[in-house]
Image: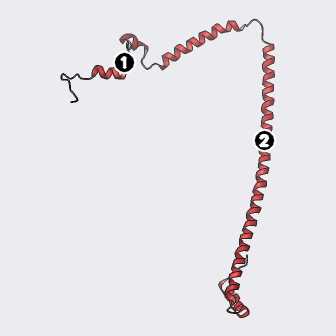
Amino acid sequence: MIDLGLSKLAIIGVVALVVIGPEKLPKVARMAGTLYGRAQRYLHDVKSEVSREIELDELRNLQKEVQETAQSIKDSVENTIAQNIDDVDAAWRDLPSSTTPSATMGDLERKARDFRRKKLVRNSAVPGWYKQRHGGKAHIMSGAARVKKFRPRSTTTRSFF
């Protein structure tokens, strides 16, 4: 805005004092201050409104770009899926009739059984040879039963009274 230094303000004050007079100068200064404040608030409101409009336009452009990109990705995915479905259908139609699904079910069951057996061996904490030599747990005892079993017994019966 306007560059007003202390010397320029002092000159303006002296001229105003001479022109307006000492009795009306405080009222005029107060009025000039309020008008200056209103002008600053108005300029600030205009600037913020213009910046909001610019940001809104930028957001609209960004939204359009994102929608176009999303649509292109959606189209490419749909095309790829359609091509894969066509490939699978073509492969299914060209499958020779000698291999039946029932012949492969026995292989799948055997593989599943072997997988479960190997997983059980992998996940057990105690090795199989140790279990065979020393025996596994024959009976599982709860925590409360274990406390009762190993708690020292008192010979005297204590009474609350």
Kindly identify which residue carries mark 1.
141
Quarter of the image with the C terminus in it: top left
Mark 2–mark 1 distance (CA, rounded to whole Å):
63 Å
Q: Judge whether 139 appears above or below 44 on screen.
A: above
Q: What residue is rendered at 75% in x and 61% in y?
A: 51
Would you place residue 83 above or below residue 24 in this image?
A: above
Residue 33 is left or right of residue 85, and the answer is left
> Which amino acid, by three-letter code, is at mark 1?
Met
Q: Earlier in the sequence, mark 2 or mark 1?
A: 2
Residue 42 percent location from the top left of the image = 74, 70
Is 17 left or right of 124, judged from the image as shown? right
Q: Is residue 150 left or right of residue 135?
A: left
* Type of amino acid at the residue the image marks with label 2: Thr
Q: Quadrant of the N terminus?
A: bottom right
Residue 155 horizontal/vertical position (percent): 18, 21
The quadrant in which residue 104 appears is: top right
Q: Nearer the viewer, residue 30 or 126?
A: 30
Examine the rendered structure and indicate whether residue 27 appears above or below residue 67.
below
Residue at the image point whose x is 79% and y is 54% from the top? 57
The quarter of the picture where residue 14 lies is: bottom right
- Residues at marks 2 and 1 touching, judged by CB atoms closer than 8 Å: no
